[in-house]
Image: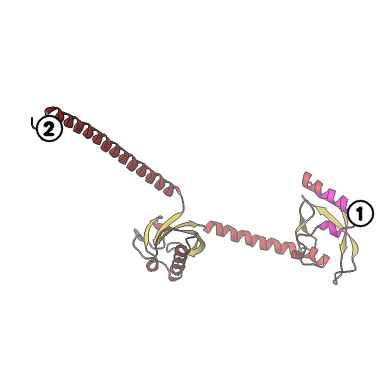
Amino acid sequence: MSKNKPDREELQKELEDLKIAYKELSLTLSDEIIRHKETEDALRMSEQKSRALIEAIPDLMFRINKRGIYLDYKAAKEELYYQSETIVGKNNRDITPPDFADLIEKKINKTLQTGKVQVFEYSLNIDHKPIASDYEAWMVPSGPEEVTAIVRNITERKITERILIEREINARAIIDASSDILCLIDKGGILIDCNQTFGSYLGHKPEELAGKCILSYLQEKDTDNYREHIEQIFSSGQRMSGKTEITVYDCRGKNGKWQVLHTKFVG
């Protein structure tokens, strides 16, 4: 055969090499396909888990872009101000009151400008509800020009807080109206709170006495005994009664004198 033409053995070797290369390429492609499928399955599973977690969270969630347009949300229809099938594609300014729209626009801009979480509260009167509902919102940046707002209905918490405040105000009024001396002390005898009667008795406002040790108003000979009474109250939880000599100052804050008081310890 001519030197320019491959002989039979060379052709056979090239054919074998091609078969091997094809087999290797097929295995590589097969591995790539398997890896690609595994990646897709993993992403799908991760998305399903993320969606399940989101659905399990009772809070409302909204994705909003810089222009105030809703991109996505998780909320029941009855929880929305805008009573429609969907708010996706709607501008917040077109479907909510102007003052609320101003607030959301301000918070979106600040979130995107600072890149920090914005936490704020607001009230919104949903159309089908007789009174306004209270909400707490956490707004976080979730893209170059979008934010995600996680919103929680805190109406019940606010009602409870208002009730507790009213009760505290009423209880405070009753305590201050009492002619008896009332004070709250810790185990070390530090005054935590007292009523107006006790404050007036010592010539101070109640807030001025907070943090002071009640032992400093006693005669030195009585402090050890008084301290023992306090410790016994805290350890046993039992009530104790007795008499205490306490320092009383005149309106000029000097010329201290001693006066005997009937003292009742309540654990």
Q: Is there any visible trace of residue 131 in the rendered image? A: no
Name above or below for residue 27 compared with residue 140: above
Q: Residue furthest top?
A: 9
Q: Secondary structure at mark 2?
A: loop
Q: Which residue is mark 1?
A: 221
* Quadrant housing residue 7: top left
Q: Quick check: marks 1 and 2 in contact, CB under 8 Å? A: no
Image location (x, y in percent) of residue 4:
10, 35
* Quadrant housing residue 196: bottom right
* Quadrant housing residue 20: top left
Alpha-carbon span between mark 1 and mark 2 = 122 Å
Task: Looking at the picture, tell me which residue is in the foreground, 93 or 42.
Answer: 42
Q: Main secondary structure of the magenta part?
A: helix
The quadrant the N terminus occupies is top left
Residue drawn at the location 78% of the way across and 56% of the way down: 190
* Rendered image: mark on residue 189: none
Q: Which residue is mark 2?
A: 6
Q: Residues within 10 Å of mark 2 (few under 14, many from 20)?
A: few
Task: Looking at the picture, tell me which residue is in the foreground, 48 or 202.
Answer: 48
| Residue 173 within the segment the image draws in magenta | no
Task: Looking at the picture, tell me which residue is in the foreground, 155 or 136.
Answer: 136
Image location (x, y in percent) of residue 27:
26, 34
Q: Residues within 10 Å of mark 1 (few under 14, many from 20)?
A: few
Name above or below for residue 24 compared with residue 62: above
Task: Looking at the picture, tell me which residue is in the foreground, 48 or 90.
Answer: 48
Image location (x, y in percent) of residue 219:
90, 57
Residue drawn at the location 19% of the way across and 33% of the way down: 18
> What's the magenta region?
209-230
Q: Is residue 37 left or right of residue 215?
A: left
